[in-house]
Image (spheres, helix red, strand yellow):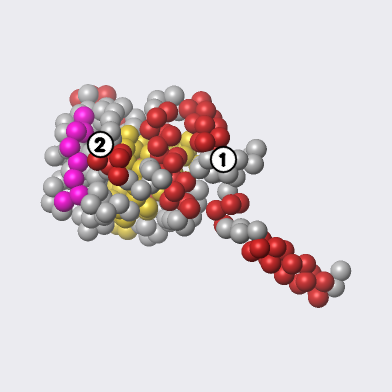
Amino acid sequence: MNANQVVSIFLFFIITLCLVGWTPFDVFRASNNELAGTKAWVEREIKIINDQAENLDPHVLKLSLTAYAKAREKGLDNKQLLTIIDYSKPSSERRLWVVDVKNAKVLFNTWVSHGKNSGKNNATSFSNTPGSLKSSLGVFVTTNQPYIGNNGYSLRIQGLEEGINDNAYQRSVVFHGAWYAAPDVAKKYGLLGRSWGCPAVSKELVKPLIDTIKGNTVVVAYYPDQKWLKHSTFLTG
């Protein structure tokens, strides 16, 4: 086969894809050819992921996968990774998961702090307001470049939901490490320390966590807040 034949075949392939309405999102399918975001795909992911992380509420996982699929459809996901934070769980429990969605594999499951004005062991109040020292809910995307800040190795996140978390970048809501977010703190005191609104994890875990999720990956911070659940464009049609 000469070079002209190779080029002709390639052009025919591209034209065919365009005619059938192909999009990059269409190639993201489960191993059994289920399109991401469909009911069958979500149910399959829930089963496989919950087998690895029994402490992840299937309802929270379902909502997070739905939000992830919407975000990916919008071109907001580069690495097929999903970080889930379940703020309905107390800080004394492991309530952060990082999931490799493509391979349905749980990469991390660890403790994470909430904002000091969101509550003590249980977060019950959330805000998008600068200076509130509260955590924010909703769907975020990670930025590309970690940095060294006042809390060491850190990663900014961008809120994607207007009025819910779109001030996250301005508020410097970032992933960072903290001594008070370590599992031994939770064991000793029955709760983690609290941040100024950031999802802080243990200092030992922060670098591998950030290096995994950096670069336009989806983060879903869950709480059964009715305003968010009913009006989020990532959770509804």
Q: Amino acid at mark 1?
A: Asn
Total marks shown come to 2
Looking at the image, do the residues carrying marks 1 and 2 touch, with CB atoms under 8 Å apart? no
Residue 222 appears at what percent x and percent y? 31, 37
Where on the picture, by quarter, is residue 188? top left
Where on the picture, by quarter, is residue 8? bottom right
Q: Which residue is mark 2?
A: 225
Locate the N terminus and report the quarter of the image it occupies: bottom right
Q: Which residue is painted at 61% across and 58% down in the image?
A: 22
Q: Earlier in the sequence, mark 1 or mark 2?
A: 1
Give the left or right position of residue 184, taking residue 121 as reference.
Answer: right
Q: Amino acid at mark 2?
A: Asp
Camera-nearest residue between 39 and 149: 39
The disc placed on residue 103 is 1
Magenta-colored stretch includes residue 128 = yes
Please name which of the two marks, 1 or 2, marks the residue nearer to the observer. 2
Question: Can the viewer see residue 209 in this picture?
Answer: no
Camera-nearest residue between 186 and 121: 121
Magenta-colored stretch includes residue 119 = no
> Which residue occupies the extreme right position in the image?
1
Q: CA distance from mark 1 to mark 2?
A: 30 Å
Q: Which residues are magenta?
A: 122-129
Camera-nearest residue between 19 and 95: 19
Q: Where is 228 relative to 160, above or below? A: above
